[in-house]
Image (cartoon, rainbow, N blue to C red):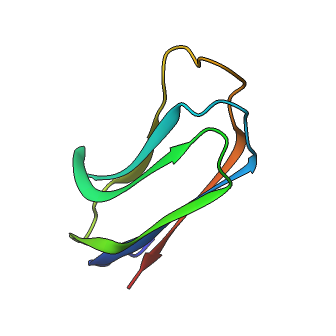
Amino acid sequence: MRTRAGTISKLRIQHNVPGTSTDVNVYTVYVNGAATAVTVTLAQNALFLADNVNSVLVPNDAQIVIRADKPQQVSGGTICREIVATVEFA
């Protein structure tokens, strides 16, 4: 497998089955274990949000992870399900 350096941008998060709670999830792109500025904070009851502003340089052979941090307990409703996350790599 070949790898290359590049730039990650445009993190897009979609909840295919939104919940009813207004509690939020925070989605963050990590590069080699470090959090980046590419992040989306989206309420459980929302459908879609994107970060079209921030980007991060990615070195060759980097480990890239999109992490979802959510509340331990959701108050006042149900949680979202079927989450889709995409980024642009150039």
* Quadrant hosting residue 80: top right
**Image quadrant in which the N terminus is located:** bottom left
Identify the residue at horizontal 55%, vertical 14% (top origin).
73
When the figure is inspected, residue 75 is found, relative to residue 40, above or below; the finding is above
x%, y% of residue 77?
Answer: 70, 23
Identify the residue at horizontal 65%, vertical 49% (top origin).
46
Residue positioned most to the right: 17
x%, y% of residue 28?
Answer: 37, 49
State left or right for residue 66 relative to residue 16. Answer: left
When the figure is inspected, residue 44 is found, relative to residue 9, above or below; the finding is above
Q: Is residue 2 among the parts visible in the rendering?
A: yes
Q: Is residue 32 among the parts visible in the rendering?
A: no
Identify the residue at horizontal 59%, vertical 34% (top origin).
22
* Quadrant hosting residue 89: bottom left
44 vs 12, nearest the viewer: 44
x%, y% of residue 87?
Answer: 48, 69
* Quadrant hosting residue 39: bottom left
**Image quadrant in which the C terminus is located:** bottom left
